[in-house]
Amino acid sequence: MAKSKDVFTRLSFFIVLSFLFYPSISIAQYEILLHKPYGQNVDGIHSMYRDLININDSLKRAEKAQEIKRFALQHNDQTLALNVDFFLNFWNSFYQNQPKEISLLKLKRQVDKYFHKDIDFLYERSLRALAEYYWKIEQNYELAFEQYLILDSRIEQINSEDYPEKARDLMQIGEAYYYFQDYHLAISYFKKAIVIPETPFNSGVINSARNTMGLCYQELHQFDSAAACFNKILISEFPEAIAWKKIARGNLGANLYFKGDYDKAIPLIEDDLSSSIEINDFGSCAGAAIGLADIHLLKGNLSISKKYIDLARHYIYKSGQKDRNKNLFSIMSKWCIANDNKELSLKYIDSTVLAIEEYNKKYSALNVLRAQQKIDLQNLKIQNSERERDVQRRIAIRNTLALVVIILIIILVLVYYVQKKKQLEKDAEIRSANHIIENSKYQLKAFMEQVLLKNSLIRDLERKIKHIDIDNQNILLELQQKTILTEEDWQQFKILFEKVHEGFLLRLKDKFPELSSAEIRFMSLAKLRFSNKEMAATLGVSPQSVRTNWYRIRKKINLNENISLDDLVNSI
């Protein structure tokens, strides 16, 4: 199946591919680019970029760029010259062996340059380039999100006819949130992108947005909404959508597979597998093979299932996407059971657990990295703010001193003590702010380590129950007593929780005063998107108790059966 989270690799592909959609033009034809607004000139600008990209020699490419720039300046078109500079800066930063510190410095200067005087939407395009550099090269996700938020506020009121790259910006921001599994927020950006009229220029990104929005709905188990997104791709009339149509058909097959409609799913997933093999997309090959292996296993076609299992193992190896093993090993375990090989089945169950734990560990590490980057960014803003205040303060002091000398020496002494007092107060504020940040950082780390440690203990106890035939009741009692959210833990948890979801607990209590303390803890974990198993491990109860708890809450607050737990906590 075509589903993939390697979104920013695809983004780079489409950024470069978009340059190749348009025919090459010679230097004599650059006159058509002169003195035109970006909305009318975007095809020609990207054709010029395509000309430069097709020059393999970097020195010749630079010479060609300077030739175009001289041509622009000779015709008094500063805007066209700046578009050449923008391309060189982007290309050298991402595709040449330019030192990273130089690339980052130039991209930042480019943003600053166009902040006050935006020309041809070069400020917006520079923001996107800087965000992408932070994401792909620096892997500083928080700084990338900061640029994306600025970009979002800039393009909100811009007409897509004037700025044809608006759809790409919205799609790229949505992809960033999809990467971190914030599906609802990602969907909100994709919805903004797909209502923009589709053109040959933006068809690739519009259909990318439709596809990933469909994947978001799949993750949320809203399969009808997902199918609507994929079907929208299939009716696109633009040639640039051909590749996306193949991907969409594969994802429609995945939709049917998830819904249990296997007979209809098989031909679509088989087509997806064939298409992926043609373009050497080994990750998609593995995904399609895994789906087909599971379907044929469920239908009792063991030999066919084994063929696709072998194919999946082959393509996982070729793609290097070992995370897919968490799905494959589970199927292999069921295949062994169907062939009366219980011993091998147990081994694959163990392999499945290890693969899932490895995946969760990687994703948790990614989120911890982003949280640390957020703290670092806050510290940096405090430091920069203090530097600005120092500069302004020094200017004020110098001007005040000049005035004081002219007037009275007594005023100088008075100003000195006032400034000194302010300095001490600000120093105290900075120390307090730094202390709060460091303390929050420590608590967050300690809390996560505690959860990991106790979850590990719970898994050990669960394994005991599986393999020891006596005293199961005592072990269960021991498991239940290893409650993670004790009253002391709960107080620490509430402090950290309120920093992320400020006012949630107060609003919950106001809206549903009848909820008990245990039920409030349950709702808090639900707000953090904990699964039933994670809630059970955290609260020290069984998964069945978690489901019972949700049932009791529904009854207590007279909740409509159509409203899910996610809907409830998101509405508060």
Image (cartoon, rainbow, N blue to C red):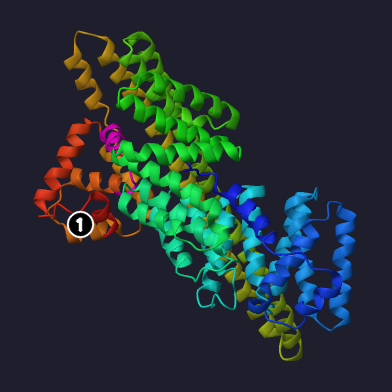
The image quadrant of residue 131 is bottom right
- Observer-nearest residue: 251 or 503? 251
Question: Dot 1 corresponds to which residue?
Answer: 509
From the top left corner, tell me how far across and down residue 43 is, in percent: 68, 70
Which image quarter is the C terminus in? bottom left
Element at label 1: helix
The image quadrant of residue 384 is bottom right
From the top left corner, tell me how far across and down residue 48 is, in percent: 76, 67
The image quadrant of residue 540 is top left
Left or right of residue 89, residue 494 in this image? left
Which image quarter is the N terminus in? top left
Residue 190 seen from this side: yes
Q: Residue at x 54, y 57 (%)?
A: 241
User: Compared with residue 491, is residue 505 higher up or lower down, i.e. above or below?
Assistant: below
- Specify whether residue 538 is painted magenta: yes
Secondary structure mostly seen in the magenta stretch: helix
* The magenta segment: 527-539
- Specify whether residue 528 is painted magenta: yes
Q: Residue at x 86, y 79 (%)?
A: 73
Left or right of residue 470, residue 410 in this image? right
Residue 428 seen from this side: no
From the top left corner, tell me how far across and down residue 307 is, in percent: 45, 22
